[in-house]
Amino acid sequence: MNVLLTGGTGFVGKQVILGLLRTGHTVFSIIRNTRKGDKLLASIPTEHRGRFHIIEGDISLEDVGLSQDAIMTLKQNQIDAVYHMAAYLSFDPKDKDKTFHINVTGTKYLLELTKKISAKRFFHVSTAYTLGTEVYAKEELHSLDRSFVNFYEESKCQAEHLVFSYADQFDVSIFRPSIIMGDSKTGEADTSFALYGIIKSLKLLKRRMERSKQTYDQPFKLLCNKETHQNFVPVDFVSEVLIAGLKYAKKDQIYHLTTNNPPSNEALYMLVKEALGIQSLVLVPTTYDGELTSEEKLINEPLRIFHPYWERTIVFDNTNTQHLCKEAGIPPLNTDIDMLQRIISKSE
Ligand SMILES: NC(=O)c1ccc[n+]([C@@H]2O[C@H](COP(=O)([O-])OP(=O)(O)OC[C@H]3O[C@@H](n4cnc5c(N)ncnc54)[C@H](OP(=O)(O)O)[C@@H]3O)[C@@H](O)[C@H]2O)c1
């Protein structure tokens, strides 16, 4: 099939491209940064490069920044499916305008382009966290009238509504991954988002601790509730399901790409502690209002944006995804401790 996609230079997009090419599809990848495009091209096995085409574009611009000639070329190539994975992933309220512009207006521009090139299907990659501050989510469109943890969630929820408003133009399906981790077999993860941003901060802490023996011996408080569970999915599972979507996804359906055995924060941070060798790390509740050292404040302050996630366990119904996986022969996802350890130990 001929596939057009956005976000190909990103963590998930690259895996989807490699998987699509491996399974014989032709990929047209909208990329805004030519340097990153060259790097991506270099990572593609030579025997597949003939089916990989880079199209310079930017989803924040009308027509996705494509010339009329480029639009015509796409139309002539009869695109079977569009995967929309490009997004701006920031939880920082200062990034509000950019977040809405790229994630909502950018999606609108891509939907319009999809219409212009008469593509048949639109696969939108959203997030499981469009549920906002709730604790249970079905594979249904969530109302916009709800409270969200941040503008990222809100922008992704608005984009989902936009996508469904085009359901009379072409077939639409939405895929909602939870927090994406590295590859379940190799552990590799090319991202600094979410858990990987936290691990980066803890690595910094380790370096600082090594410079100051005194702090290294003291317990180091990380404000994170032990008992709640976080929903992590490996990137290879996400890309496998997305690719299987070409054959098995149903129109107007939403798919939660989530795990049914999410680890507790305690289990997860035990693995992080081991991988980074920071034995002094202790988890204390996010409501802790006792003394924190200046080092503890330095690490904990920027992580406050994650507290709304660490304070609740969310249950995601993933019946649609289970059906899709069964049809496609994808084994049920089991994010057990061995898998998590394999992934987290790679981040050392
Ligand atoms: N990572 C997660 O844990 C997670 C969880 C749930 C859902 N998701 C969703 O999964 C999708 C992929 O996430 P990811 O982790 O792969 O993100 P990522 O690594 O940050 O990649 C984002 C991609 O979007 C592209 N992009 C951003 N703005 C663009 C623009 N104006 N025009 C064209 N391309 C643009 C980026 O291009 P550049 O390389 O040029 O910046 C990059 O290729 C997103 O929709 C995200 O919301 C991710």
Image (spheres, grey):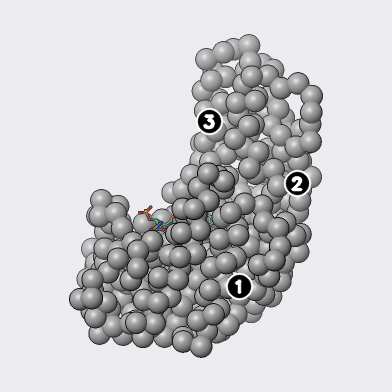
**Residue 175 drawn at (x, y percent):** 56, 70
Q: Residue 56, located in which quarter of the rendered image?
A: bottom left
The mark lying in front, picked from 3 and 2, is 2
The mark lying in front, picked from 3 and 1, is 1
Mark 3 to mark 2: distance in Å?
23 Å
| Residue on which the image places disc 2 | 311
Element under disc 2? loop
| Residue at x 50% of width, y 81% of height | 166
| Residue on which the image places disc 3 | 203
Dot placed on the residue nearer the N-terminal end, 2 or 1: 1
Q: Please name whichever residue, 2 or 240, is drawn nearer the observer in this view of the structure.
A: 2
Element under disc 1? strand
Q: Is residue 210 above or below residue 196?
A: above
Q: Please name whichever residue, 223 or 263, is drawn nearer the observer in this view of the structure.
A: 223
Dot placed on the residue nearer the N-terminal end, 3 or 2: 3
Q: Is residue 178 above or below residue 240?
A: above
Q: Is mark 1 within 8 Å of ligand 1?
A: no
Q: Amino acid at mark 2?
A: Glu
Q: Is mark 2 within 8 Å of ligand 1?
A: no
| Residue on which the image places disc 1 | 255
Dot placed on the residue nearer the N-terminal end, 3 or 1: 3
| Residue at x 73% of width, y 51% of height | 229
* Disc marking residue 16: none
**Residue 98 drawn at (x, y percent):** 46, 53
Q: Amino acid at mark 1?
A: Tyr
Seen as rendered, the residue at the extreme left is 69
Mark 2 to mark 1: distance in Å?
25 Å
User: How many other residues sit within 10 Å of disc 3, few (<14), some (14-19) or many (≥20)?
Assistant: some
